[in-house]
Amino acid sequence: MTTIVLQASAVVIGGRTLLIEGPPGSGKSSLALALVDRGAGLIGDDGVTLTAEGDVLIASPPPHIAGLLEVRGVGLVTLPVAPPAPVALILSLGGPAPERLPETPLPRRIINGVAVPVLAFDPGTIAPAPRAEWALAMHGLVIKPASLCAPDAPDDSA
């Protein structure tokens, strides 16, 4: 297993991790806060530990900042920490203007040998959290829970 720490925020929605990357001031923490307010779990703000386990990338909180989220103009707040979860999608903030209707399938980035879809995303002021949730629902990897896989059962997804 290879582990890295990535400068990104990460939340868990429905058992899948949404990574939020971008330069300082692009809205990573604000989007994470909006998603947490809607029921997402916080894995990390401005830092996330990523470990490759087979063909899945697992996100977990970085030890020294676990549970801390920066609320701009307010300070650091402490939130419950979500358990580790598989990464399903990367939202990339602060780059070129995203397409109105993104190409599908999305481009993928290889992290620790695992290909993860990347969506250029502008949080803007119109419903950023619901739009991020829809992005995960529409473009995120479908990850079969390990608890549903029998050790010697054939994989019928092929």
Image: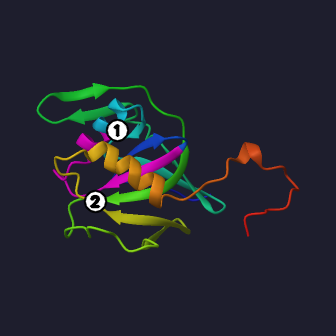
Name the quadrant of the N terminus: bottom right
Q: From mark 2 to mark 1, how far is it between C-alphas?
A: 15 Å
The magenta region covers 16-32
Q: Nearer the viewer, residue 96 or 85?
A: 96
Does 47 sit left or right of 59 as displayed? Answer: left
Does 88 sit left or right of 44 as displayed? Answer: right
Mark number displayed over residue 121: 2
Q: Nearer the viewer, residue 4 or 13?
A: 13
Q: Quadrant of residue 2?
A: bottom right
Q: Is 52 situated above or below 68?
A: below
| Mark 2 crowdedness (10 Å alpha carbons): few <14, some 14-19, many ≥20 | many
Numbered disc 1: secondary structure:
helix
Mark number displayed over residue 153: none
- The verdict on residue 25 being magenta is yes
- Residue at numbered disc 1: 35
Residue at position x 29%, y 37% in the image: 34
Name the quadrant of the C terminus: bottom right
Q: Residue furthest front?
A: 101
